[in-house]
Amino acid sequence: MNNIYLPQLVTIEDIYEEAPDVRSFRLVFKDKFLRDSFEFKTGQFGLYSAFGLGESTFCIASSPTRKGYIQCTFRRSGRVTGGLYDLSIGDTMGFRGPYGNCFPMDEWKGKDLVFIAGGIGLPPVRSVIWNVLDRREDFGKVTIVYGAKTVADLVYKNELEHWEARNDVRLVQTVDPGGETPGWKGKIGFVPAILEETATSAENAIAVMCGPPIMIKYVLNALGKLGFADEDVYTTLENKMKCGVGKCGRCNVGDIYICKEGPVYTAVEVKRMYNDF
Amino acid sequence: MENALRKKAKELLEKGEVKVVIGFGWNRDKTFTTPVFITKPEDAERLVWNPLCVNNLSVYLTRKFKDIQALGRPAIVAKGCDIRNILVLISEGQLKREDVFIIGVTCNGVVYRQELRKGELKPEIMPTKCHNCDVRNPHATDFVVGDKSDFKPPESPTGMVFNKIKEIDSKEATGRWDFWVNEFSRCIKCYACRQVCSLCYCERCITEKNMPQWIETSAHPRGNLSWNLTRAMHLVGRCTFCGECERACPVNIPLNVINQKMITVVKDAFDYKSGYDEKTHPPMIVFSPDDKDDFIK
Amino acid sequence: MPDNFLKRRDIGKLIASVRDAGGRFVAPALAARQAVYKDISSAEELDDDYILPRNSYKELVFPQTEVIADFTIGKDGVGLKGRDVTGRDTVVFGARPCEAASLESLRSVFTWGFIDEFCTKREDRLVVITIACTKADGACFCTTVDLSPKSVTGSDVALSETDAGDYLVHSVSEKGKAFIAKHSDVFKAKPSADAVVKPIIMPERIKGVDLEKIKKFLSDTAHYENPVWPELTRKCIGCGACTYVCPTCHCFDITDEATAYGGKTPFEGERRKNWDACQFDNFTLHASGHNPRDTQFKRWRNRFMCKFNYYPKKFSSKGCVGCGRCIRVCPVRLDITEVMEAISKRP
């Protein structure tokens, strides 16, 4: 019988400390066939099991250009993420997926890209960023605006350093007022305001953003001011999910089931949604 | 009686003494009563009072209903038994006496369930609580509607619930256990018992606490037993036997029996009955240095 | 014209032959003073006086709780095994036409893109025998949602009761025809000439309800914030009774439970799929504390939208079949038809 709720077993190959209470896992399938054949697209998500505690939904934070493993990043905040957080390298967990739609990256060839993320909203955007950087010549200018509450809360610190150092990426980092440290060289302010400051051109450009619901609303405004048309603005939404496959009935924003019809939407679609965030 | 009720409600709203009157109104077909929230003086005409007014509206005074609290100071139409719950809420610090205007209604009993009512109210369709009621003349009110009742409850309590308790008490421990396991096995975990209860006011119920998962959420015998027993324990010394949980139960679990049993236990051990005095705290939530048991010292 | 005839006194024989073949015979019977669908073994258990069983027979395809996988955690790592469902030949006898129409709606969800075989495999082996209603109560509103006691949607075999308590038999689906053929000893070929059908009770259509208007109102996202929602649903206490008795509500939770703890044996557990209700405040609560449906009216609005907008739009199936169970069980008598009526009256 085809059991759509049955996860695959994966091994934690490596663990990275990203920020207080935030960790990334590098996961490989136990099943050799699956390890070689597993495919996914940027923007898709999965359900991750801590056996005995349950499942939790996160995006796949790695890029499909990197084969043989998947990476996820999560914050310890509940029963399942708490259980996952306690796992060690070599431990087994479960994975179901990939689910959902993806970013239409092929349509973006030759365009400038601006990425906007807040806090733990960077992981889904990271998948796009690495996908772009791994085939850098396909795209135009790359700008990343990333902010978090405090300096400590910025995730992927090593990668931020790497992006900072690259001359084909413009990285603007910011922290909320009061979240800075004495040596902080980045900006201080909220993401939407800093985004406006960057004065990124909307000409032949695509914006990709992810962050908390409140940030999405303000970033949409800021992008509008910069001249971005709604159809060129993409975001990935998240809601509580249990099944991931359009059955359990809780991730809907109005008539739209994020697991099944999302999680990637353009601002046109977001603005058409019921106010059910 | 209804006219006096409507007049008072109208006056309270007009004077601005309260912003909302929580009371009973008719459904579309005038076959069932249902809670109504009157905010405009002219709508006070919608208020009704009759033996179908079974709901204990005090649940709407709890913090579970933030949007009702946002309307402003409430007046509530309450039977004596409902007022007992309000007093427990006050004694547990959930409400201040002055935060609510209590319109007490004298009551000659209500129906056990509204669908049972056909014609006159007969004792057979009244719940056990009504047969033993000592608050037909409501206590702790700000205003009373209705003529004084001279009903005297029987010396020793009577009614189906008490008969059932006697029957269960006469069983061996295994028999009592089997009885409850069987009754709880029907539970569908809809939590209507909890939601309709004004004393189940926790914003996060024990069933929703999952670190660790104290109570299994599955509606299998184990999960059902742990939920129903835990809820009964959380009501010990607090439950007023208003009967809302049993009335709300879609699968007819005799929750009145377990709750009344606990009430009797508390009465025997502490000589305490909840809901008569807002200044006395339920025995299970206070500690007294001269407690006759020394297990806690 | 009916296809066959079923004598009341032959029902016992039918029960026996279904059960002898390893099947289950589910019918309205009394439990705790009310009619519920129950697995019965004799015709004596049948309740003669029911209008509609309290529970929905959706639990025959979508049980309240079921194990979807077993796992162990021990020294040698994690073991995981998915459960299989083969289903069991099941007859639900005495279902009502309103409810039969709901299976289609459940199927739409459980086969949307991904196929939930826990449900489909059970449904494949389910035979639904409906009996046209000769009784109704104030909560029945099938006619208001364009169904009727004569509807046969979702039914495999449709029965009409005669004055003598026997049944005229109409086979509706292929499954129903096969069932009748298999039990030809009880489904007699010819209805007796003098059989008079009991009058069917048609619940009156609620005059103020206009389904088209409701659809239009709900489709307009601008009405989502309309104050009508908190006003109409203020009394809702947020229990899950309506959703659990509803034949089309399908929401569930997935949860892990321990069956044996540590010590010498490995930790053993089950992953379960349990009914859940959109009316519970933690249904959509994020771990971060954010809750998209943080007040009760939003949760009630979601259920209403789901029935009269989202699912009809997505699957062109009926989100509500008018069985009235939600009205009967509601502890505060929040009557869905009163909300339908109020919304129909909006400009």
Image (tube, grey):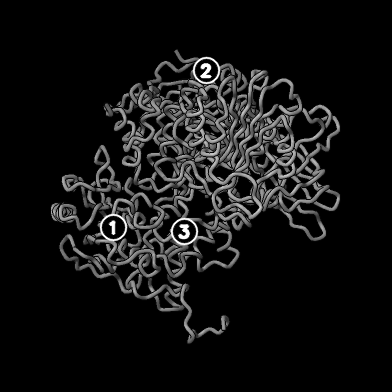
Is disc 3 surrounded by few (<14), some (14 to 19) or many (20+) residues within 10 Å?
A: few
Q: Is residue B18 left or right of residue C175?
A: left
State the mark number for residue B123: 1
Image x and y of residue C249, in percent:
50, 35
Which amino acid lies under the numbered mark 2 shown in the image of this protein?
Ser
Tell which subunit mark 3 falls on: B
Image x and y of residue A261, in percent:
57, 26
Q: Are marks 2 and 1 on the same chain?
A: no
The earlier-in-sequence mark between 1 and 3 is 1
Q: Nearer the viewer, residue A256 or A121?
A: A121
Image x and y of residue B58, in percent:
33, 58
Give the SS element for disc 1.
helix
State the mark number for residue B202: 3
Tell which subunit mark 2 falls on: C
Is disc 1 surrounded by few (<14), some (14 to 19) or many (20+) residues within 10 Å?
A: some
Q: Which residue is mark 2?
A: C171
Mark 1 vs mark 3, foreground winner is: 3
Are the residues flagged by discs 1 and 3 in contact, CB closer than 8 Å? no
